[in-house]
Amino acid sequence: MIDVRGLGFQYASSARQALEDVTFSCGAGELVLVAGPSGGGKSTLLRCLNGLVPHFHGGTFAGEVVTGGLDTRSHQPRDMAGVVGMVFQDPESQMVAETVEDELAFGMELAGTEPLTMRKRVEEALDLLRIEPLRARRLESLSGGELQRVAIAAVLTMQPRVLLLDEPTSQLDPQAAEELLTTVRRLNDDLGLTVLIAEHRLERVVQYADRLLYVAGDGSVEEMDVRDAMGSLPIAPPVARLGRALGWSPLPLSVREGRPFAEAYGRGNGNAPLTVHSGSTPRGKATVRLAGVGVRFGEIAALRDVTLDVFPGEITVLMGRNGAGKTTLLRTLAGLTPPDSGTVSVLGRDVGATATELLADDVALVPQRPEDALYKQTVAEEIGETLRGTGREGSIDEALEEWHLEPLRDAHPADVSAGERQRVALAAMLAGRPRLLLLDEPTRGMDYETKELLVANLRSRCGEGATVLLASHDVELAGRCGDRVVLLAGGEVAVDGPAREVLSESLTFSTQVNKLMGGRYLTPEDVLARRERLGT
Amino acid sequence: MATRAATVERTGAGGARMTAGSLHPGAWLAWLAGGCVAVFLTSNPLYLSLGLLAAIGVYAAVRDTAKGRALTPFVALGLGLAALSVPFNVLTGSSGPSLLFTAPSLTFPGWLGNVTLGGPVTGEALVTATGRALSIAALVALAGAFNASIDHFRLLRMTPRALSQLMLSLTVAIVVVPQSLAQAKAVSEAQRLRGRRSRGLRALPGLLLPTLHGALERSVQRAESLDARGFGGGRPDTSVPPALAGVAGLGLCSWGAFGHYYYGASWLSIAALAAGASLVALALLQGGPRQTSRLRRDVWSARDGLVVAAAVVSVALVAGLRLAGAGDAAYLAYPDVVAPGFHAAGALAFVLLMLPALLHAPDVAGSEHKR
Amino acid sequence: MASDAMALSDRPARPLVAGRQWPAAIASGLLLTAVCAAGVAAYAYPFLLSSLPATTATPRAGDAPLVFGLVLTLALLLFVAELTRAGMNAKVVSLLAVVTVAAAALRVPALPAGATGFFFMVIVAGYVFGPRLGFLIGSGAMFISAFAVGGFGPWLPFQVFAAGWIGMTSGWLGAAIEKPLRGRRRTELWLLAAFAGLWGMLFGAITNLWFWPYVAQGDSVSWRPGMDLAEAVQHYWSFYLLTSAGWDAWRAIGNVALVLVAGRPALDLLRRYRDRFSVRID
């Protein structure tokens, strides 16, 4: 289905080869994962397969790519639209029509398809992606997850044989991301569609993948067996990392596969494992105090009577469904959404009476989309803007170093890769050691290395006495770094307790390792630490 | 927040889109054109008053949508300006025998053309100015009703083949609006979070450029998506006949237009105008990149036919009165102000324009979808 | 590997208007000329008609704005169709959408200097992207914004065409001075500001023209068929000064100020994008 021989590509604006001498092939009906560090060339590789590289982007192209019998050197992307469909990262910027149906029909209309055939295919695509109820909706009224499913449906109406997905979940919240990945797997299963997917969220797909293409970032692409790859690459999901550390073979890729090993190892042992980080330092005076806080948007109560104290030196994770009020709570603390009732005090200041610009001296909020935070010409200027505006102490170099951005100092924030941009946004918003750090869903679409860096930096900020409050759906992140978990439901605080208690023995809010090993284990490191202590 | 109620469409047999209630945009367009032509063709204040009433009636009938309410200030402004044109015209120079009163006058210097403001105010000038104000107000109300009632997307879908690509771009442009507003809000918040203290107008350039930048970045991805979904613009269209038809059509039109004033209104010049317009339409329908197809077509209902027929009849009636010199369609207050004549056909012409007010039914309001 | 290397420039696969065979090129040239002639005639009809002998008994040309509005609409449609006839690639479609909506959005808010942002955007975009895209951006933005401000009426074709001219002439200005003034950015900015100020006045003067015979009736400001050209110009001048000059001057000042304040970063932004995207199409 896909034959790549000796592929090389260099962007016109770049000094180094993005891809060099890449050779691989994919059979019909395969599900292939494309993995690798961000900015490493995953997107470029996928774009080579439907001719966007070189025809759209321009640059120096070498070798041969044949997809579905069409050679990309002699066929433009538009000629390949009937063979290869591609779905991109940002759901909003793929849309060109005003309603779901029109969006689905767009490609067929361009191709001059018969109206009756069009009708049939639109119905099929609506059913396949289970978006029939949305058919007459305007696109601007859909959520990100719904939009991505519309994007896939729109591509499927062209009846392609190959589906390329370029980090399709990077802008989605975890629930929507999981649904999307489940859908993709089903399409691969039911239709025999060849699927190549670049994805960071491996837990959901890795067990179904036939193969993995590792795009290392130096131009090379390595074709790997999935189990081998999980045995050697840092991107493995927690179950695989645990299995690797404990020498389980064949390496389990899902909780189900790991269960027999866990039973043999002794599931549920160790109710109080030695923690990797200690969340038990004595609490200081609360830095954030909410008393009876309520926020309403018209008819909807986003927060109801929330009373909560947050303490310095620990990481508090806000969890809960979409619309539970997590984002509203963070915005209220930063002064962006004034409370309708109750009192909010942050670091001794009354938030209702203080402008966001003034609060910014001590309070930093990192919004969900890094693009939303950035607006200057270079990375260094982005950091400088915050330091200048807030009067916080600190230097640009310090922030660059903290987030490993030294090589990008003079780069334009729009020119760096998605993972790098997340680091830039973190560096810019958190520059100059604010005393309260608010992070809204910081790990959305984040790659493995960035996540590690984030956890390490948040820990060290906490160690310096800062207060960290982060809203996240990411259970693994909460397990890795959370000291305390506050679960919001319907705008109210439903559960509030130490992370280890809240995140264990729960059906939906448990980490993978906890589902596997039970007890109070949250991460592979917990299991290993206990094993070390027991000396086995 | 959705700015207007989502249109709930029902799917009928044969894939027809039956938007409950609203008229076909083509019918609205014909109504607007017919209304404007009829208003331009007469200067009789009696007919024009009827026209204004009809237009306001339709506007009032269709106004009750989010969009209609948003337009209300613009329509009010337009009506206000129309009213202001009366004192402007009366004061910049009145002539005629029926002196009403004499206002204090002021003469501007030579470089202003020795214009005299004020001075004698005559009945002839007042009647003429009122007639013109009435017609301007009628045009504003016609436009207001049209703008409040049409769906941009449905209107853009009607464009001829030769303009399809540009119209795709304009469709995308409308799609981009809510995204850009959200982006502007996000940028403004990020600036506040980073301690930037300027607000309001002074912050505008600082807000505009990052928003534009974000939109441009996203447009790269949209272009990729367009390309990957088969948008290629087709083969370069180098056919000669459409271009020549365009040249010929435009030539005929211009000749007809100038002939109309040079030799006086005649059937010949009107025929030349019509023939030229048809040729241009042909060129636009035939030219263009590539045949595409449509998932759905807007359904043309009997009501739409009625509205178009009413527009045509109303133009025909006014034009007929004018050509026949009956009913004072081309009323002049000079040399002596006299009461304008009145003919039932002229009245009927403008009453017919009320039709959409009766036939229009608001779209079945869907729940306002909210992200 | 090097032998089969395929170098593709960053340019779009096909320019907006491809090289044509000569009959097509002549037909296209003929069409554009006809459009220009008809367009100018449709705006300037009060002056053109005034030079004709008043042989007819036309008491007043109340329907003239209508007839010339029709001519102008047809000319406009043909012009736009011709500009986009060879097919626009996806980059142009997408870019056009974004810049158009930016300009259109700026026409809506009641800024103190009379929607001066619209002029700023169209002028800067035309300057950077060239006359063809400039025309499409200006006219498209005027058209789109008409939906929002209730501007869909008989005056629309006149406004749309004039807005297109703003973009087109800015494109000419860019073609003329952008290269020679490279490195002399202050001069460039002042020239652009002056140009924006000029259009601030000119736009009102042009778009009021079509309505003038219909609206004005006073002795020294009105139009009569058969009046002599010099007199027509004099009357229009008075009419313009009395009705719209003050407003236009305010707008012109706003344009100049906005170009001086935001012109440089805006030019940088669009140029950066043009160079990365290679969407200059002339």
Image: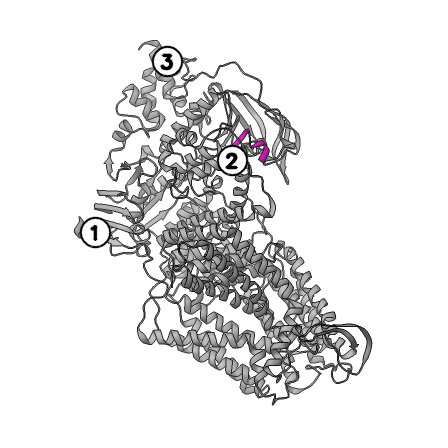
Q: Of helix, strand and loop, which one carries label 3?
A: helix
Q: Of helix, strand and loop, which one carries label 2?
A: helix
Residue identified by numbered label 1: C5
Quadrant assignment, res C56: bottom right
Q: Which residues are magenta?
A: A357-364
Amino acid type indicated by mark 2: Arg
Quadrant assignment, res B110: bottom right
Residue identified by numbered label 3: A530
Q: Is residue B325 left or right of residue A30?
A: right
Q: CA distance from mark 1 to mark 2?
A: 49 Å
Specify the subunit that label 3 lies on.
A
Whole-percent x, y for residue B183 in the image: 51, 45
Residue identified by numbered label 2: A388
Q: Is residue A243 left or right of residue A444?
A: left
Whole-percent x, y for residue C209 in the image: 59, 72
- Residues flagged by tags 1 and 2 on a common chain: no
Q: Residues within 10 Å of mark 3 (few under 14, many from 20)?
A: some
Whole-percent x, y for residue A118 in the image: 40, 57
Q: Nearer the viewer, mark 3 or mark 2?
A: 2
Nearest the eye: A193 or A423: A423
